[in-house]
């Protein structure tokens, strides 16, 4: 059976769990219930003002602590890409629309371009590099390859991480559910067909066959 | 000379198998390094300053404040942006700053003061009556006797149709990392042109071409916009030379959308003349388009139905103050398909005929009548045309109306000039080297499959080395020419290398080299798997010498390995909510002929992706220009809309690789399937709601306006 744990409850603030794009679409079409919740991490009220110059910031990425000197305005995405070397999360729209920068913060899918690095100190940041590649690739990565769910591959790490969060909340989705999900991630090459099959395959392999086969 | 021809279908061991792309794992796991991911020791980050006005003269540029800022290493004024320069579109590059961090570079860019004299602009071409002197008529072209045709016609139909400018919106934006090592340049661009882009940069910098080393493992979309180093590449190189440090310069998203290329618009008023039985006898069109200040070229219309006998064509190129066009996946074809197929669909309605019959009846006007007729039948079968098609306007009660529509397309796709080197090492390793690039199409994988097919090895045994201009020259990835070029070059290089290996093995097995074959990981006497040497044992005979052989695809003599010329038909099934105006895709059927298919898995992906782009263009995507300010209103991804997973419905792909197509050799598939979809969707919407929505994207406002008889 799956060893998957339910992600810790994160207290939601108003507006959380709805991407801007998703919101526009859902209002238009009324299919909101199944979109992946991609939300900024909860903000802790700062006790002191930080910056504007660099301040010490500690990030826990894939279980490893990194001590950095960053300006408070540096986004999590830029911290990962420019100041560390986690380049799996991509900068595409850079303003919370396309999902190419999706990472998990305490198990929840987050647009790394839309959260500051300083906000996510003490939280567990999981990037695509945290998923195993060898000796055996993560089943989700394997499923993306098997189903040719990528072409140029630039959006793919974001989709993989969104799919991680999606499957954590929906471990046994139907194809119909998958078709209406992932409105918070965009792909320019148009690999949605493969992505749908990949997510279904990954869910089934985790379920040992799956009920919705 | 060996017989390079492709193995017969029944003899193929690798071709035709659904092989996973060989770089899939490294990409899906985020380990792949794109140019945007390159990080060099001591690297500076650059930010650009661009002109905010659509038409202006640069009065002065004051960089002094920026130069004094902490962390700033250098400021550069772009070549061609000196004070006095007339700027013709917003987003034009003025200056760039290199600084220790990206944040500091952006601060410094904001501190650069540029004064402009603002000049009058013109940015919207959709209404031809308003373009005035910005419209340049291209002259009239007449074939046959159109006046007589329209006079003698039983039925004449007329309509206005249009597609706006759309952006390339390359997920990996444009840019590069550049590092000088003495007079040598290390260059990490994001490009469709690994073998050529270095020489172009060298020319701009006045250094010998051999001094530029181009490296690109992966790239995140080009769609025709990434062939040249561009002004930002030259600026980056100059900043790197000035500072003596590596510099990374990538355009932000809004600038990419404004200046790094776009697909020209195409609008047309079209009249068709026909006989009662549906035979088209005359065509008249007044088209207009823009690709920025160069205007826009005439669309190739009438499209596919090129041999309509009596034709009058007028075109007006319209200059607008907006970023220049670039090649965009099948340049001008999707627009021409849209214009032509909408006009034929409207004609069918006037005739009271099923459009499927009209498209088929006139197929003799196409270059390949039998191909189009069979594809129309196949697509009709897959979408259930007989059962689901109804005359224009879904009469079923309720607010949701369903409809079907047809689009057709064509493309070339013959292989480009490509050279390949195949190295067989004494330890059995095989390398194939080409100065090519995998732009997401699966080029690496088809190269590996071609070598594996030829050498009788598993795909995983082939090391594909591309993405470096030190490998043998290979053409740019444009025009769907790559797969034919690289597969043919790889076939020849690997066969040449294998022939050398046979010469070494033959004495060992006591036969002549020509009696040998390479299958199942061994070199054996033809048809006799027992009289054989395992691959590695065979290679061990090389001693300390590797085999290194070249192969070339010469486009003038492809030797039957590749060719060009394909047809495609797509049919769309949509539902339209006539109260909200929202169009939903149900299905899009893609029927595409292509030659020999090396990897059905990645070939189908090309079709899925292309169909998705048609959905984007038909329903969501457009550059919106503001008349008052001259600015693009949606240089972002919130309001520049593309289709997401919930928006695309179901895409059904049928690759027509019957033996008569297979024997034509390899044909490029990147562009053809992007052509017919917009027309198919537009005609399906018209079929559903009973009226034509003249301009795409068919957003709710345009659909409702069409339903109410207003002009959107």
Image (cartoon, coloured by chain):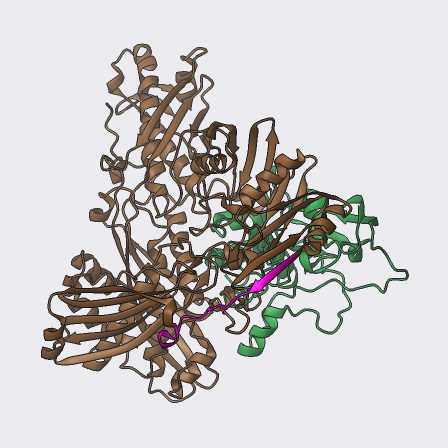
Chain colours: A green, B brown
Q: Nearer the viewer, residue B323 or B247?
A: B323
Residue B516 visible in the shown view: yes
- On the picture, is B653 further left or further right than B463? left
Residue in the picture at 24% in, 72% down: B344
Measured from the top left, where is residue B425 in percent x and y? 44, 19
Measured from the top left, where is residue B607 in percent x and y? 38, 55
Would residue B127 be counted in the magenta stretch? Answer: yes
Would residue A100 be counted in the magenta stretch? Answer: no
Image height of A155 relative to B676, above or below: above
Measured from the top left, where is residue B309 in percent x and y? 13, 65
Q: Quadrant of residue B155?
A: bottom left
**How many badges with numbers are in the image?**
0
Q: Nearer the viewer, residue A162 or B473?
A: B473
Residue in the picture at 24% in, 64% down: B139
Measured from the top left, where is residue B594 in percent x and y? 28, 50
Image height of B2 relative to A46, above or below: above
Q: Nearer the viewer, residue B409 or B143?
A: B143
| Figure quadrant of the N terminus of chain B | top left
Residue A172 visible in the shown view: no
**Residue extent of the magenta highlight:** B114-131
């Amino acid at each position: 059976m799956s060893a998957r744990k339910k992600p810790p409850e994160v207290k939601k603030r108003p507006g959380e769990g709805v991407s801007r794009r998703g919101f526009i679409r859902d209002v238009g079409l009324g299919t909101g219930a199944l979109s992946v919740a991609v939300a900024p991490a909860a903000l802790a009220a700062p006790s002191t003002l930080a910056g504007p110059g660099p301040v010490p910031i500690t990030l826990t990425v894939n279980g490893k602590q990194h001590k950095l000197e960053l300006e408070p305005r540096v986004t999590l995405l830029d911290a990962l890409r420019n100041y560390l070397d986690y380049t799996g999360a991509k900068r595409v729209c850079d303003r919370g629309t396309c999902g190419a920068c999706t990472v998990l913060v305490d198990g929840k899918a987050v647009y790394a371009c839309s959260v500051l690095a300083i906000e996510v100190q003490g939280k567990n940041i999981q990037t695509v590099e945290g998923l195993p590649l060898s000796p055996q690739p993560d089943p989700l990565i394997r499923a993306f390859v098997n189903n040719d769910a990528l072409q140029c591959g630039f959006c793919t790490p974001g989709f993989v991480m969104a799919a991680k969060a999606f499957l954590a909340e929906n471990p046994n989705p139907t194809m119909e559910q998958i078709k209406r999900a992932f409105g918070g991630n965009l792909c320019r090459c148009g690999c949605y067909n493969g992505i749908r099959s990949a997510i279904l395959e990954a869910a089934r392999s985790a379920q040992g066959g799956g009920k919705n086969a | 000379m060996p017989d390079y021809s492709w193995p017969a279908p029944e003899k193929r061991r690798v071709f035709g198998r659904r092989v996973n792309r060989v770089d899939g794992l490294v990409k899906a796991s985020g380990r792949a390094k794109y140019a945007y991911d390159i990080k060099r020791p001591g690297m500076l980050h650059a930010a650009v300053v661009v002109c905010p006005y659509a038409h202006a003269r640069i009065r002065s540029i004051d960089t002094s404040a920026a130069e004094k800022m902490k962390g700033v290493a250098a400021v550069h004024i772009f070549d061609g942006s000196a004070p006095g320069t007339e700027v013709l579109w917003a987003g034009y590059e003025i200056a760039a700053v290199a600084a220790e961090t990206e944040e500091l570079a952006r601060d410094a860019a904001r501190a650069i003061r540029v004064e402009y004299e603002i000049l009058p602009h013109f940015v919207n071409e959709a209404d031809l009556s308003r373009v005035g002197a910005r419209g340049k008529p291209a002259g009239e072209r007449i074939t046959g006797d159109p006046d007589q045709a329209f006079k003698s016609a039983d039925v004449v139909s007329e309509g206005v149709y249009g597609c706006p400018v759309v952006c390339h919106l390359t997920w990996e934006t444009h840019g590069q990392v550049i590092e000088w090592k003495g007079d040598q340049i290390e260059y990490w661009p994001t490009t469709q042109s690994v073998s050529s882009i270095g020489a172009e940069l060298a020319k701009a910098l006045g250094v010998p071409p051999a001094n530029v080393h181009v490296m690109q493992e992966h790239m995140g979309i080009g769609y025709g916009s990434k062939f040249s180093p561009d002004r930002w590449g030259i600026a980056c190189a100059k900043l790197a030379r000035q500072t003596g440090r590596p510099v990374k310069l990538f355009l932000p998203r809004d600038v990419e959308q404004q200046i790094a290329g776009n697909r020209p618009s195409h609008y047309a008023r079209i009249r068709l003349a026909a006989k009662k039985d549906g035979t088209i006898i005359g065509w008249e069109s007044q088209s207009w388009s823009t690709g920025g200040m160069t205007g826009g070229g005439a669309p190739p219309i009438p499209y596919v139905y090129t041999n309509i006998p009596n034709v009058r064509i007028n075109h007006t190129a319209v200059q607008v103050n907006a970023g220049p066009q670039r090649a965009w996946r099948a340049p001008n074809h999707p627009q021409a398909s849209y214009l032509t197929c909408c006009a034929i669909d409207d004609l069918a309605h006037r005739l009271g005929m099923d459009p499927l019959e009209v498209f088929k009846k006139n197929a003799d006007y196409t270059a390949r009548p039998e191909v189009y007729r069979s594809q129309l039948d196949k697509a009709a079968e897959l979408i259930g045309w007989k059962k689901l098609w109804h005359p224009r306007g879904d009469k079923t009660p309720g607010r949701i109306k369903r409809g079907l529509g047809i689009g057709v397309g064509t493309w070339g796709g013959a292989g480009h000039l490509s050279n390949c080197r195949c190295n067989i090492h004494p330890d059995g390793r095989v390398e194939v080297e080409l100065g090519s690039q995998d732009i997401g199409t699966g080029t690496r994988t088809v190269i590996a499959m071609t070598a594996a097919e030829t050498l009788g090895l598993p795909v995983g045994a082939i090391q594909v080395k591309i993405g470096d201009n030190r490998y043998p020259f290979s053409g740019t990835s444009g025009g769907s020419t790559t797969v034919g070029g690289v597969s043919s070059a790889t076939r020849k290089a690997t066969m040449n290398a294998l022939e050398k290996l046979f010469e070494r093995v033959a004495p060992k097995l006591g036969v002549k080299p020509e009696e040998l074959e390479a299958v199942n990981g061994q070199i054996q006497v033809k048809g006799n798997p027992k009289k054989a040497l395992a691959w590695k044992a065979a290679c061990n005979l090389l001693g300390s010498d590797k085999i290194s052989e070249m192969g070339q695809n010469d486009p003038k003599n492809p030797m039957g390995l590749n060719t060009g010329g394909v047809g495609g038909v797509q049919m769309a099934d949509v539902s339209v909510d006539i109260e909200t105006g929202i169009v939903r895709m149900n299905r899009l059927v893609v029927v595409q002929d292509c030659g020999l298919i090396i990897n059905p898995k990645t070939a189908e992906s090309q079709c899925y992706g292309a169909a998705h782009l048609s959905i984007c263009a038909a329903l969501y995507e457009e550059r919106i220009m503001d008349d008052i300010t001259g600015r693009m209103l949606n240089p972002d991804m919130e309001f520049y809309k593309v289709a997401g997973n919930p928006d695309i419905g179901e895409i059904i792909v049928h690759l027509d690789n019957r033996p008569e197509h297979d024997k034509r050799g390899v044909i490029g598939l990147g562009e053809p399937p992007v052509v017919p979809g917009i027309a198919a969707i537009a005609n399906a919407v018209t079929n559903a709601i009973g009226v034509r929505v003249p301009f795409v994207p068919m957003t709710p406002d345009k659909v409702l306006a069409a339903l109410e008889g207003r002009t959107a």
